Image: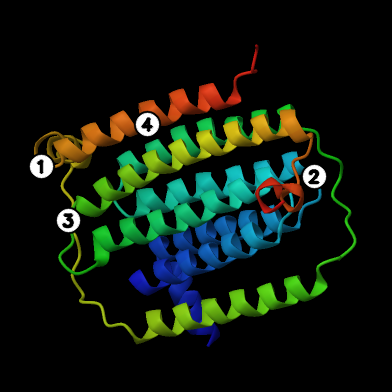
């Protein structure tokens, strides 16, 4: 049973990776990163039930993971809004001020 | 073949797993393929709620409620606010980065194949977590005894990140 959960998490992670690298809209890139973090959470919780030495530690670790993901999304949206106010774009290919 | 499949589906747990995982993958694929940004966020909300269902199947009820509250609730609303603050025209871009996209597709599929082979090769012990009725209580006890320092550090980190987000997003008035 655990290998089906791990395969599902791998599918989610790869879809998130593809979206994060191919989309041009910065909001969608952030959403795809959240998708990848969710895949990792699913792995942690699956191992907390079916893995070697199963215990509650995996669930606690994924709680910390969710917290960090929330902080990351908040800071990402804040940077996006500040950037939009200055450059009037939400396109990741135009966010290249540091390259100039 | 077909009998095996029907046998597999007649188990309630397997049937639930199939339904939830289908919903998860369909939501993720729609997130990639839909045209409008708000529709993409709705598809992602479907994925998050179905993941909460999978967490319930894995004896993680507390995590399931946290998932619904934080991801399906707060994160989706935050992203919709982000979409409202910025302007989006309908994405109908011509494939300008064709080579980039092809390489990305090949790389992603290759990565998935590597992961799949590794999962199939690995040997896991048939050993199941014996969950007691009071999972949430046990999580609370562990969090405030054994993991109390990481817990406090995470709370400080979250406060700092949110204050920083407010300062970054604030309109600069001189």
Residue marked by disc 4? B158
**Host chain of mark 1:** B
Q: Is residue A46 above or below residue A30?
A: below
Q: Could you say which disc has been placed on residue B36 in the image?
A: 2
Q: Secondary structure at mark 4?
A: helix
Q: Is residue B100 left or right of residue B125?
A: right
Based on the displayed image, in which of its 4 quarters is residue B64 positioned? top left
> Depth check: A71 or B70 in front?
A71
C-alpha span from label 2 to label 4 = 31 Å
Based on the displayed image, in which of its 4 quarters is residue A81 positioned? top right
Q: Point out residue A97 in the picture as x, y percentages from the top left corner.
A: 70, 46
Q: Point out residue B159 in the picture as x, y percentages from the top left corner.
A: 37, 26
Q: Residues within 10 Å of mark 2 (few under 14, many from 20)?
A: some
**Host chain of mark 3:** A
Residue marked by disc 3? A55
Q: Secondary structure at mark 3?
A: loop
């Amino acid at each position: 049973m655990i290998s089906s959960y791990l395969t599902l998490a791998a599918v989610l992670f790869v879809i998130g990776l593809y979206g994060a690298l191919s989309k041009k809209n910065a909001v969608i890139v952030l959403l795809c990163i959240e998708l990848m973090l969710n895949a990792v959470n699913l792995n942690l919780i699956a191992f907390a039930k079916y893995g070697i030495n199963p215990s509650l530690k995996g669930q606690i670790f994924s709680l910390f993971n969710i917290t960090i993901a929330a902080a990351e999304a908040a800071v990402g949206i804040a940077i996006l809004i500040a950037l939009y106010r200055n450059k009037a774009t939400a396109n990741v290919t135009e966010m290249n001020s540091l390259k100039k | 073949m077909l009998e095996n499949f029907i046998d597999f589906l007649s188990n309630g747990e397997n049937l639930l797993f199939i339904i939830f995982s289908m919903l998860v993958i369909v939501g993720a694929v729609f997130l990639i393929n839909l045209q409008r940004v708000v529709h993409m966020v709705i598809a992602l909300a479907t994925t998050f709620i179905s993941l909460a269902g999978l967490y319930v199947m894995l004896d993680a009820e507390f995590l399931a409620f946290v998932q619904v509250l934080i991801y399906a609730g707060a994160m989706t609303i935050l992203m919709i606010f982000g979409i409202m603050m910025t302007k989006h025209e309908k994405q109908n871009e011509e494939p300008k980065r064709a080579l980039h996209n092809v390489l990305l597709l090949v790389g992603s599929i290759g990565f998935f194949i590597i992961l799949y082979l590794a999962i199939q090769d690995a040997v896991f012990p048939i050993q199941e977590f014996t969950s007691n009725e009071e999972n949430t209580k046990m999580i609370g006890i562990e969090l405030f005894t054994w993991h109390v320092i990481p817990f406090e550090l995470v709370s400080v980190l979250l406060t700092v990140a949110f204050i920083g987000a407010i300062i970054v997003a604030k309109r600069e008035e001189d």
